[in-house]
Image (cartoon, grey):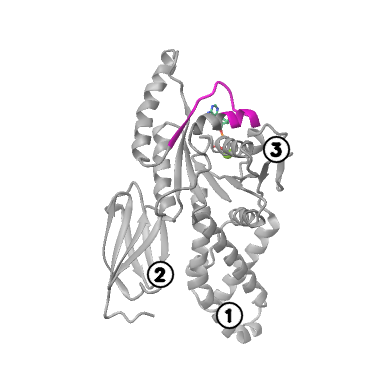
Amino acid sequence: MRVILFTGKGGVGKSTIAAGTAALAAAGGRRTLVLSTDAAHSLADAFGCEPGSIGAEPTEVAERLFVQQVDAQLRFEQSWADIQRYLLSVLDVAGVDPVAAEELTVIPGAEEVLALLELRLHARSGAWDVIVVDCAPTAETLRLLALPEALGWYMHRVFPVERRVIKALRPVLSRAAGVPMPGDSVFDAIERLHSELEEVRELLSGPDASVRLVLTPENVVLAEARRSYTTLSLFGYRVDGVVANRVFPAEDADDWRAGWVLAQDEVLARVDESFAGLPVWRSEYRPREPVGVASLSGLARELYGDSDPLARPTGPGPFRVTRSHGAATMRLALPLVTRAEVHLARNGDDLVVTVGSYRRLITLPSGLARFRVAGARVEQGELQVRFVEDPNETGR
Ligand SMILES: Nc1ncnc2c1ncn2[C@@H]1O[C@H](COP(=O)(O)OP(=O)(O)O)[C@@H](O)[C@H]1O
Ligand SMILES: [Mg+2]
């Protein structure tokens, strides 16, 4: 099964391209699901369906082609809020500073969690050859994709402590007025959610999944796409292509359009340069909105041309560790940044990598815990961190 995610700035054509790619896959004989995680659902519009005719269950719009718009369910959101409120009250009783407590219990947006869980269910069902995900605009997508790992970190580092603290305090707390005492079921629920999200993370960072960036040839849009490329890589996702959408055709242009063609050409040259090594597929600005299965698959057919729209990403993958006696090198794809823009810190068994406002806590493979960081560099779009064995470190 192949999973392809589309993201990019608002309005650039994510839904159109996602829907087109899915329509093409279905036309090629694949059982295909396209689902949107963007609260501003526009898949129904792209397929030209009646508003309301596409909902929270997969709806067949053409042979082998199903569409679903994942919706936040209030019930889920509320039970999540309950858990958080509970944890806060307990940490308060335990004397944890309220600001720190707030931080410890910040749990990701319910809507996003729900979308990821939906994806997991579909991936496990065995019903699909291809799942295309029409994502929310970049920032939200990044939040979404950082989520499973962030929760994983919380589960490994904070949650066991919380659980222990609560267990120890239970006799005291149950006597204190006003503190609700949940059974183990609350913790079990959180643990189950965690393992499910970890599965999603494995799926999305694995060899069958990739992210495609959609952009229009404008400087502001390109700037955002470049940042997303860096950040997606930071979080360990494979970007395997770029779609330049709404490119003005050059033929028979009047002065106004000729001006745009020229301006877009300049940006397109920078797009090719920015994403060197990745395919940059171009899609013309159509005289009208591409709506409906036929129109969308036509657009996708032109977009991908001779290349296989479902090809799996190639290359060594975004994250690797190689070892040689007494030393090791960790490599992380990190395109479009200089060493100066990357901040590294060691925190126990974690390596904290910060780029701009995004931070990833990479749990070092066991065995590297005894190593210290000997140096780091950024070379050809890759962060390379060198570790050497440290006789003073005993490991924990
Ligand atoms: N290549 C294109 N030519 C003409 N119109 C397009 C093209 N791509 C997208 N559109 C139109 O642009 C609008 C925004 O596209 P959409 O796919 O909804 O963007 P997003 O999902 O990124 O917000 C829609 O009305 C869509 O029909
Ligand atoms: Mg959209």
> Which residue is drawn at the image coordinates 54% and 23% (left, top)?
286
The span shown in magenta is 280-298
> Which residue is drawn at the image coordinates 42% and 60% (left, top)?
360
Number of the front mark, 1 or 3: 3
Magenta-span inclusion, residue 131: no
Secondary structure under tag 1 reads helix
Q: Which residue is mark 1?
A: 166
State the image coordinates of residue 383 (x, y, percent, origin top left).
32, 56
Left or right? Give the position of 183 relative to 353. Answer: right
> Which residue is drawn at the image coordinates 41% and 22% (left, top)?
260
Left or right? Give the position of 311 relative to 46. Answer: left
Give the residue type at disc 2.
Pro
| Above-or-below relation of 36 to 320 | above
| Above-or-below relation of 96 to 225 | below
Q: Which residue is mark 2?
A: 365
| Above-or-below relation of 36 to 147 | above
Mark 3 or mark 2, which has the lower sequence index? Answer: 3
